[in-house]
Amino acid sequence: MQPNPRQLTLLSLVQARGSVSVEQLAEHLQVTLQTVRRDVQRLADEGLLARFHGGVRVPSSTTENIAHQQRESLNAEGKSRIARAVAAAVPNGCSLILNIGTTTEAVAHALSEHSGLRVITNNLNVARILSANPRTEVIVTGGVVRGRDQGVVGEAAVDFIRQFKVDLAVMGISGIEADGTLRDYDYREVKVAQTILSHAREVWMAADASKFNRPAMVEVGQLSQVDRLFTDAAPPDPFPQLLADAGVQLHIAH
């Protein structure tokens, strides 16, 4: 199909935000819910959008994440707001772990003016960003380097992280499902993430709105293991209640 101008605007809005409710689309486009649902159905039939209950998101696979370069540009403005909110909450002189992900890389940029940080990471991009700051000490895990995103994975990374207990873990995630399950794609990366969850005094999740209702194959953990969730837009139902039940502090970076 050749999308009409309204459908192109709809696509751009979803790509910018990652996921959008049908009501938000109707309000933004100033059309009826029926019109939005019809457009969404046509675009979903062409594989340009993926539907979930109450909204739409960028299409994705449960077995493979989209490319790192594409993830960097996807909702970059929202990730930047999340990163600034996280950095504002991180005190100087603390220890933390940053894991793999474009959102945690944005957090690393936002932490560039901090001092006295001791950062453990299995993300070489994070290490490159933060090592430019002479007031921050960066410790990189051992393991296998994934060339596509400079993430370090495998048992060596797991064994390395087990030596530490840090003040904060700032983690990205590929998907948060409607039952509160945290999910990712690479089981080797998940093993590292699970170790990080259990070796931090507080766990902060940095996830833009596209991660809600996004499927992925491997279970990392549950929302109940997270202390704070930083995102860029109000999460759709049922997540507000899930977060409240799990005792997770929600921070929306406006």
Image: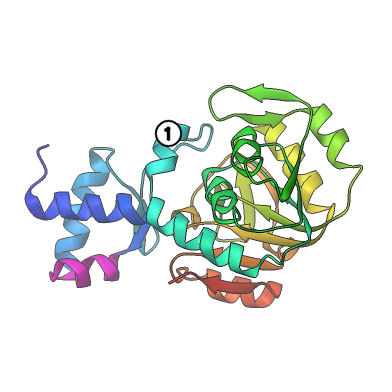
Q: Which residues are magenta?
A: 22-33
Q: Few, some or many C-alpha atoms within 10 Å of disc 1 (few <14, some 14-19, many ≥20)? A: few
Looking at the image, residue 138 sits to the left or right of residue 83; the answer is right
As drawn, which residue projects farthest toward the right? Answer: 163
Amino acid type of the residue tagged 1 in the rendering: Gln
Instruction: Based on the picture, tell me whether residue 24 belongs to the magenta stretch.
Output: yes
- Mark 1 highlights which residue? 69
Which SS class for mark 1?
Answer: helix
Residue 198 in the image, given as x and y percentages of width and height: 84, 53
Q: Is residue 6 above or below residue 242?
A: above
Q: Is residue 53 above or below residue 182?
A: below
Residue 177 in the image, given as x and y percentages of width and height: 56, 55
Q: Main secondary structure of the magenta part?
A: helix
Foreground residue, 169 or 129? Answer: 129
Looking at the image, residue 242 sits to the left or right of residue 54; the answer is right
Foreground residue, 196 or 180? Answer: 196
Residue 193 in the image, given as x and y percentages of width and height: 73, 44
Q: How many marks?
A: 1
Query: Quadrant location of the C terminus?
Result: bottom left
Instruction: Based on the picture, tell me whether residue 171 belongs to the magenta stretch.
Output: no
Residue 136 in the image, given as x and y percentages of width and height: 72, 49
